Structure formats: structure tokens, C-alpha cells
Amino acid sequence: MLKNINKDNIPEHVAVIMDGNGRWAKKNGLLRTIGHKNGVKSVREVVEASVELGISVLTLFAFSTENWNRPKAEVSALMELLVSALNKELPTFQKNNIQLQTIGETNALPKGCREKLTEIINETSGNTGLKLVLALSYSSKLEIINSIKSIAQKISDKTIKPEDINESLFANELYTSDYPNPDLLIRTSGEYRISNFLLWQIAYAELYFSPKLWPDFTKADFLEAIVEYQNRERRFGKTTEQIKN
Ligand code: IPE
Ligand code: IPE
Ligand code: MG
């Protein structure tokens, strides 16, 4: 599969909505939390593939603001899983030069999670390879509202004028200000929706929907998505002829 990939057209930023852990568990007669545990393997495969391909940023939607409304036991299990996975993966991050970062309202996470995240973010901050960005307690609408609040405050403080507002000033207020916009957005589990993920940032992303449930999603599936991406023509509003020249 790797040989089908054009090394000159690797997406810089890939974002993934990792969906279908619960259905995978149900299908196999297991508890939802076991589904989440089995999803970690898929994370590992996608991260590994991203390192091999030389992708710069991989953003994984791990927990949405809306996911706080799930049963308490499932939320706790997810938080514990996050801590244990981070503990296990630190050596791999170091070996593969991976920098861990987060987007979202991470202040809302339990203390143990916040501390573990801070620790791993600090430990990997000198790494210069793949930026692995976990979206945790993330809501795109909330991110946009917070940006508007911050801009309104700056106007009220007279540090900027309303006419200074443009796309780049706005994008600078988002959690994702340090990253290029996603080139490719993958969602698993056969759902065709965005679920409040990176609404502003995916304005021109290529969308790829896989029928596979997240724990069944492999490196080969990820590479297939990359190949599909490479077969798309990104026109950004222009004509094919303009793109070709
Ligand atoms: C994705 O799997 C993981 C999270 C949202 C945390 P789900 O838990 O949403 O699985 P389904 O969609 O119920 O199958
Ligand atoms: C989106 O999945 C959030 C994550 C993958 C973390 P959900 O399972 O929460 O999305 P909906 O509810 O099906 O839209
Ligand atoms: Mg789901």
C-alpha cells in the first residue's frame, strides 16, 4: 500500500473523528468501555502511519464537550484510559520524535488527567517530528464563541479596531492557531456528520468517511484514505485548468 502513495502529495494536517467504539463493543457482546480500550490500538496504528508518511499534524477527536453528557461510568473509564494510554505511549513518543499537544477545554478534565497531559506535553515539547494533537473536551462552536469574546475584549480595550478583523486575526484566536488547516478529515463508523469538530478549520478540507468502526480501523485503512486524498483535485474555487497550470 505504501508504494501507492505519492510522497510529494502528503497532507500536512490530517484530522480524525474516531467513532464507533461503542458499536464495536456491542457487536462483539462486550461493554462499551472495552470498545474504547480496543480503540487505543487503532490510535497507535494511525500515529505510526503518520510518522512514516511524514505528516506534520495529526489531530484526533478523543472527547467532545457533548460527551460529558454520557453515563458517568463511561466518562470516568475514558478519562482513566487516557491516563493509562499516555503512560504507555511516552517511550514511543520519544522514540518517534512526537510532540503531544491538546485543543479544547482541558481545564474541565479531572485533575489526574490534566497532570498527566501536562507532564507528557512538557516531556515531548522538544520533539520536532509529528505534532499529535488530542481534541479533549472540545467543541468547535465554543472555540468560535471564545474567539469572538477575546476579539470583543481587544476592541473594548482599544488594542484593535473592528476593521482589523479578518480571517487570519480570527484564526489566531482559535486553539489551532499554531497549525495549518486540516487537508484531510477522516470519520469512521459510517456516520456522515462533523459533530462540532473544527468547523472553521475544515472549510476546504477533503472529507473521507470510512464504514469501519474505530477499533477495526487499521494502518492499511488510513493509507487507503491517504491514497483517496491524493486522487482528489483540490480546486479552492478555481477551475481545473487553473489548477493544472
Ligand atoms: C467514539 O466512539 C469515542 C468517543 C466518542 C469518546 P463512541 O463511543 O462514540 O462509539 P459509538 O458511536 O457509540 O459506536
Ligand atoms: C464525536 O463522536 C466525538 C468523538 C469522536 C470524540 P460522537 O459519537 O460523540 O458523535 P455523535 O454523537 O454520534 O454525533
Ligand atoms: Mg459515536
Image: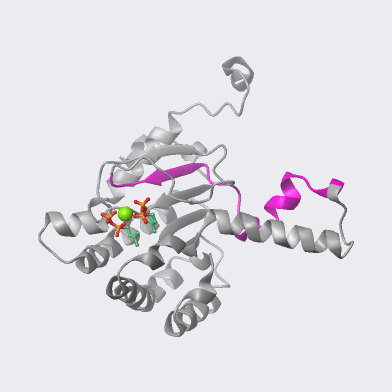
Which residue lies at the image location 9% right of the left edge and 60% below the top edge?
29
Query: In the picture, residue 93 is in which quadrant?
Result: bottom left
Image quadrant where one finds the N terminus:
top left
How many marks overall? 0
Q: Quadrant of ligand 2?
A: bottom left
Residue 83 percent location from the top left of the image: 37, 78
Which residue lies at the image location 60% right of the left edge and 18% below the top edge?
239
- In magenta, the rendered stretch is 163-189
Q: In the picture shown, does residue 207 fall above or below 181?
A: above
Residue placed furthest toward the top? 241
Q: Is residue 45 visible?
A: yes
Which residue lies at the image location 59% right of the left edge and 19% below the top edge?
244
Q: Which of 9 and 195 is in front in this view?
A: 195
Image position of 211 (left or right of 150): left
Residue 99 percent location from the top left of the image: 52, 67
Magenta segment includes 187:
yes
Q: Nearer the viewer, residue 115 or 58?
A: 115
Q: Is residue 178 visible?
A: no
Residue 25 percent location from the top left of the image: 17, 60
